[in-house]
Amino acid sequence: MRLPTYSVSEYLFLAAAVFSGLLAVAIFCFLFFFGLPLLQSGQLVDLLFSSWAPDKGLYGIYPMLITSLTLATVSMLISFPVSLGCSFVITSLAPVRLRRVLLAVIRVMTGIPTVVYSFAALFLLVPLMRSLVGHGTGMSILTAAPVLALVIAPTMILFFVDSFSKVSSRFTLAVDALGGSEIQKLLYVILPLAWPGIVNGVLLGFGRAMGDTMVSLMLAGNSTAAPESMTESARTLTAHIALVMAFDFDSMEFKSIFVCGLFLYILTAALMLLFRMFTVYFSERT
């Protein structure tokens, strides 16, 4: 029996979805299996709340965990208002020709490798931060945060623009008919209707900020001590994994990177799930 074309397409899409789900589960199992020796050694509490001191038998990821969350949060605080403002300009405030140019530039920015941003910031932003702070190398959370904000902004802008464009023209035309301004249209019609798309953009941006390696590796300083201020050198979980990979394969230092990956996986998944539940809950109430 020959299957209809649409059924074949459905099966293909279903297979792709199942494969993606199984791949995510397989990655979790892979990290858990290789991190098991360290977890079984009874050092789970030490892993979460102690510092990184391999010479003393301590493989704690607390400083890296704190740095990852701090850097991702600060970069989001910088990137979110900038991305939202750019989305307003692209969708409503700028002339039509300028909107197209800006949108094309944003799309190009999404394809620029993060190493390019980091390399430019290494020679432009790091000396500036060093002279402003007055001590240290200039590499810190405060240096890496604006660059990471620049990296995640194009993705968020594209999500915001897409969610704004999906708002029904019935509502926007009604504002025009009542003599409302573009700002009023944005604030009182588009934003309240497009907020689920905005939340999704924030989700994706935060996940990318947590998972980025190159910016933090080149600009944050990579100190294994827990940072006490934004101007101190620090190391994120992703940068820690990249640096510890140079250790011997059988060493506990190397095995600890699987635990780092596992915690990064769980933390990111938990945050995504929390945001999704938040979105669904408020969508049902509005």
Image (cartoon, helix red, strand yellow):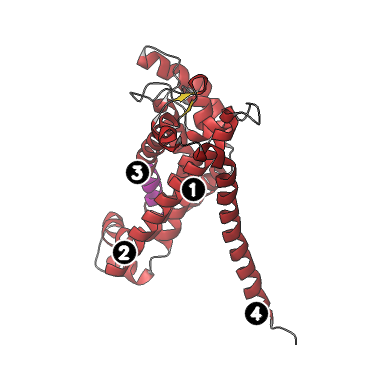
Judge from the rendering whether residue 92 lies leftward or rightward of residue 59; answer left or right: left
Image point 58% across, 39% down: which residue? 112
Q: Nearer the viewer, residue 252 or 221?
A: 252
Q: CA gap, disc 3 to disc 4?
A: 44 Å
- The residue pinned by badge 3 equals 81
Q: CA gap, disc 4 to disc 1?
A: 33 Å
Magenta residue span: 82-91
Residue 29 horizontal/vertical position (percent): 57, 51
- Front disc: 2 or 3: 2
- The residue pinned by badge 2 equals 281
Q: CA gap, disc 2 to disc 4?
A: 33 Å
Q: How many other residues sit within 10 Å of disc 2, few (<14), some (14-19) or many (≥20)?
A: few
- The residue pinned by badge 4 equals 7
Q: CA gap, disc 3 to disc 1?
A: 14 Å
Q: CA gap, disc 2 to disc 3?
A: 24 Å
Q: Nearer the viewer, residue 56 or 117?
A: 56
